[in-house]
């Protein structure tokens, strides 16, 4: 007859083999968070910047199937339950993307843009050799400005393959 320890180990191995143990742990964490979350304590108002940042993170989390992490973010941040429309994010962030860029979260393109300067061959550029110091200097915006954040210089996202 199997002991409790052996049954526990067998169950753990079976859940790991099926690939659901991590999901179960994440679900438990999310449920514990929801149970402990004090709804009576008012949250500070969600700023426009935080709303946009949280939405970029949520899009990334949901794309990568981190649904429990996304649910905790939504609850803890006071983010609207319904995700913001991607076109709204693109307009608010002044991003221009081609049809191929729409297949992955905006955050991938934004990160790739700032790490590599071009989005044509993501992810090889991130994993490849770092740009030379001269290339890095050429990409540094003038003081007080971020590249691609003005109306005159939209952030262009294109052909991202993930």
Image (cartoon, rainbow, N blue to C red):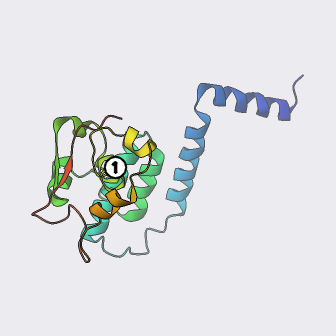
Q: Is residue 152 left or right of residue 28?
A: left
Looking at the rendered structure, the secondary structure element under dot 1 is: helix
Q: Height in image: 145 above or below 134?
A: below
Question: In front: 56, or 120?
Answer: 120
The location of residue 138, given as percent across then percent down, is 28, 62
Q: Residue at x 28, y 44 (%)?
A: 119
Q: Height in image: 128 above or below 8?
A: below
Q: Residue at x 55, y 39 (%)?
A: 23
Q: Is residue 41 left or right of residue 117?
A: right
The location of residue 48, given as percent across then percent down, is 24, 68
Quadrant of the rendered image containing residue 100: top left
Q: Residue at x 58, y 32 (%)?
A: 20
Q: Looking at the figure, which quarter contains the N terminus?
A: top right
Question: In front: 97, or 73?
Answer: 97
Total count of labels? 1
Q: Which residue is mark 1?
A: 112
Question: In front: 57, or 139?
Answer: 139
Q: Residue at x 35, y 64 (%)?
A: 78
Q: Looking at the figure, which quarter contains the C terminus?
A: top left
Q: Is residue 47 left or right of residue 33?
A: left
The location of residue 27, given as percent across then percent down, is 54, 45
The location of residue 38, given as percent across then percent down, is 48, 68
User: Within 10 Å of the Cα at label 1, are there few (<14), some (14-19), or many (20+) other Cα atoms?
Assistant: many
Quadrant of the rendered image containing residue 53: bottom left
The reply to whether residue 85 is visible in this rendering is no
Q: Is residue 99 left or right of residue 19?
A: left
Residue extending furthest toward the top? 1
The reply to whether residue 25 is visible in this rendering is yes
């Amino acid at each position: 007859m199997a002991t409790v320890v052996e049954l526990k180990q067998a169950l753990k191995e079976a859940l790991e083999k099926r690939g659901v143990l991590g999901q179960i742990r994440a679900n438990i964490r999310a449920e514990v968070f929801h149970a402990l979350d004090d709804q009576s304590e008012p949250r500070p108002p969600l700023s426009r910047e935080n709303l946009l940042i949280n939405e970029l993170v949520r899009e990334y989390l949901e794309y990568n199937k981190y649904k429990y992490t996304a649910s905790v973010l939504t609850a803890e941040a006071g983010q609207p339950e319904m995700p913001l429309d991607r076109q709204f994010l693109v307009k608010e962030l002044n991003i221009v993307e081609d049809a191929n860029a729409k297949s992955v979260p905006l955050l991938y393109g934004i990160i790739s843009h700032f790490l590599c300067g071009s989005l044509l061959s993501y992810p090889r550029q991130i994993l490849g050799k770092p740009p030379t110091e001269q290339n890095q200097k050429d990409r540094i915006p003038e003081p007080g400005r971020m590249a691609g954040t003005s109306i005159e210089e939209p952030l262009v996202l294109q052909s991202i393959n993930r």
